[in-house]
Image (spheres, helix red, strand yellow):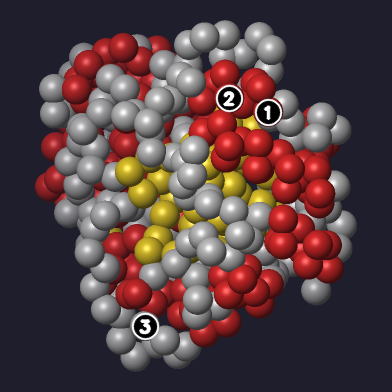
Amino acid sequence: MLNQQPLNNLSGGDVGQLKYSVAPMEGFTTFPMRAWLYMVSQPESMTTPFLRVTRTHPDGQLPMLFAPELFELRGAFPYSLTPQLITGDVELFLQTADLLPPDVSNAIELNCGCPSPSCVGKHAGSGILRDPASFGATIERLISSLGPQRLAIKMRLGLDDPAEFNNLLPHVASLPLSQLTVHGRTRADRYRGKARWDLIQQAAQTSKTPTWASGDVCGKESAAELLATAPNITGAMIGRGLLRNPWVFEELRSDTHQKISITTLANALLCYALLNDLSITAPEKLIAKMGRGRLVSYCGSDAGAWERTTAELTEMVCRVPMVLSSGCSVLDIRMVQTAFARMRMLWSYLRTSLPDSFSSPKLMRAKTSNDFFSQLFEIARAESLNDELITLQHHTEWDELFGGTRGTS
């Protein structure tokens, strides 16, 4: 784990005493993003998006890109990785856990929080919380088979009412879990409204297991507010907050809002898209390159580091090393549409930590990466930002539009 530097002069306490980790997000924190997030701001630990376990999947072998950091790329990245599974069937969970033995993964997490109807209807995800006694019995059976401190769980407060948490928590508070992560919302809340940090504090005070908070940490200010409300937690999982500002882990370590040039931001975004492209078109090639120690460097906000990484990735995808520059024509960079769509989805969140001018709908309407970056540099020129450093800072006033809180008070 990376050493946390003390963050001073923040209301509510020293958030440097907390640990911070990448929360599992279906469709987002896949292997390409995890590799990219390490380049961006070096999270010390991460959890995979859930692997849906059924009678026919994963069928004796894990998907190549589910958790290569635990297998082909073991030791290539310094962050720790916890694999997460989702199923309502104990035996299927244990069969898949056998593919992740202790010498590969210290702990395996059971998803007890996904609000999707397809999961809830099969008593998986937050559906497992419907019956508190059955929930506790399921966790006990898993611990009995896996051994103590080998199972982690991520749970919500309940299905429909936060009051349900009072009946759920006693069934797991005394069990020898590896980690208890509480997303401070119910299944009915989905991702709307404010996370109930006070109930997460209740779990941290009651549980014998290290308790982590999940929900609404977007930067050093919100981390301080969380610590003031829940001083007994061990750490915070950051999900949508890192989409809004991928440099958030560096912000938390340094107690400083990060600054970045528009050209550096553009090259970083392009790298994210290219990593996704390679994961789709040439995953073996990507893993082999990383296994040789390439593309595993921290770039942060350093322009030169991102240019070197961009050149290496464009050479792999386009056969010619290229970089983006505000003073030149945007390059003809062709990639699969899915890779560009993932970059644009990331941008839909990230723009809420940038100056207002970058909320232009033209960027979201761009059909290709070339169109997108042309528009990006055009906005920067119009605002005289080409040679300026842009401060990355979460704007809470944008949450109602982009943070999943629309329609709530």
Q: At numbered mark 3, what does the secondary structure look like: helix, strand or loop? A: loop
Q: Is residue 350 left or right of residue 10?
A: right
Is disc 2 placed on a helix, strand or loop? helix
Q: Callout 2: 10 Å neighbours few (<14), some, many (20+)?
A: some
In the rendered view, would you say 235 is above or below 11?
above
Please state which of residues 356 and 275 is positioned toward the viewer in this rendering: 275
Crowdedness of circle 3 by 10 Å Cα count: few (<14), some, many (20+)? some
Residue 312 in percent (x, y) is at 18, 27
Q: Residue at x 19, y 22 (%)?
A: 291
Question: Cβ–Cβ below 8 Å for labels 1 and 2?
Answer: yes
> Label 3 sits on what residue type?
Asp
Indicate which label's residue lies in the foreground, 3 or 1: 1
- Label 2 sits on what residue type? Leu
Pointer 2 residue: 94
Whichever of labels 3 and 2 marks the residue nearer the N terminus, that label is: 3
**Whether residue 382 is situated above or below residue 118 in the rendered picture:** below
Tell me the residue at 27%/13% (across/down): 285
User: Is residue 336 or residue 281 the one in the foreground?
Assistant: 281
Is 251 or 394 nearer to us in this picture?
251
Pinpoint residue 335: horizontal percent, then vertical percent. Answer: 40, 20
Q: In the drawing, what numbered circle is on residue 90? A: 1
Q: Earlier in the sequence, mark 3 or mark 1?
A: 3
Which residue is painted at 55% across and 78% down in the image? 230
Disc 3 to disc 2, how far (Cα)? 40 Å
**Which residue is painted at 65% across and 36% down in the image?**
141
Please give the residue where the numbered disc 3 appears in the rendered image.
14
Relative to residue 148, is residue 269 drawn left or right?
Answer: left
Tell me, yes or no, whether the two marked residues, 3 and 2, touch with CB atoms within 8 Å.
Answer: no
For marks 1 and 2, give the CA distance: 6 Å
- Residue 67 seen in render: yes
